[in-house]
Amino acid sequence: MSIIFGFCDESGEYKPDRSDRFNRIVPFYVRGTLLIEAADWKELYNRFNYIKRKYKLPDEEIKWSYLWSIRSHQKNNTKINEKDDYYFLREFEYHQLIDYVEETLAILNMIESSDIILTVTSNNSNCKFGMEHLYEMHIKSLLQRTEYGLNGKTNGFATLFFDPINAKTNEMLRNIYKKIYKSGDFVKEYKHIKDSLNIEYSHHSVGIQMADFICGCFIGYLKGYSRSVEIFNKNIMPNLRMHKKSILGAGIVEIPTNPEIRIKISDIVENNKNKC
């Protein structure tokens, strides 16, 4: 039986009522999922930790957002305070940390089963959905594509792990997942996915930490940040889900479906294609 682990995290922010300033600062909300065969998990785990030891990093979770906070401190020559979540990285240069993340994401190219699905909402669209509806659309898109990917594999089976947000939202996510699972949609029956969503602490999970790097890098890619584009092109793009030789609608999915936003994403992909 082919068992698939799916690790999902989020990046960016969304709210129904948004100002122009909010949209400039936070143009996207993204959920990213890394799917790998369970048999490959140990390789991912071992390589991830080997690279962390190679860079002599503390045995603590490093989030993509920490890199940009540290970059800002070092660029502006400001002090990192003890209360900052990334204080434990105060002795490391930003360039060391981004090199570490790049080498970590390169693991994806060594694992044949790596499969990435990114769902993205543009805050510069006319979306006015509440958070519950937004989560439902993102989760539904993920479940559909996970099921499609396993369709035809009689013994294929996937179980999904989400990073926790807070107790109330975690319960909401679980209920949304169960509702979709039971009622179906375009997919009449989810035969290849476990019936319950798993909440997994990111600081305990190499898979969730990889999903965090993927999400953060993707937002940087959409914004055109050169290092994010370089890392994305080398290590994430080759592992995106494809359908009929296209990543759009398969590996990168706009939420909700919007032809104008898809064209904009397509233009970004085309513009970033040869930047390495």
Image: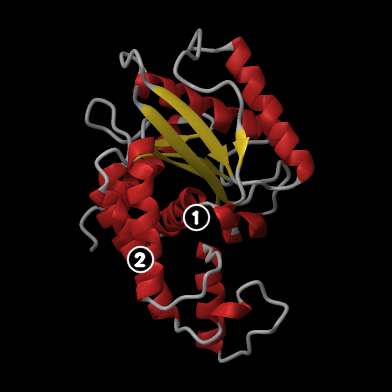
Residue 185: x percent and y percent? 54, 12
User: On the image, numbered disc 2 is attached to which residue?
Assistant: 50
Q: State the residue in front, 248 or 19.
A: 248
Q: State the residue in front, 79 or 189.
A: 189
SS for dot 2: helix
Which of discs 2 and 1 lies nearer the camera? The answer is: 2
Residue 207: x percent and y percent? 46, 48
Above or below, 28 against 198 in this view is below
Question: Given contact means CB atoms under 8 Å apart, are the residues at marks 2 and 1 in contact?
Answer: no
Residue 156: x percent and y percent? 37, 21
Q: In which quarter of the image is the C terminus?
A: bottom left
User: On the image, numbered disc 1 is attached to which residue?
Assistant: 209
The numbered dot on residue 275 is: none
Above or below, 179 against 69 in this view is above
Q: State the residue in front, 96 or 23.
A: 96
Separation of residues labelled 2 and 1 (CA atoms): 15 Å
Q: Which residue is drawn at 58% across and 59% down?
A: 24
Q: What residue type is labelled 2?
A: Tyr
Residue 93: x percent and y percent? 45, 84
SS for dot 1: helix
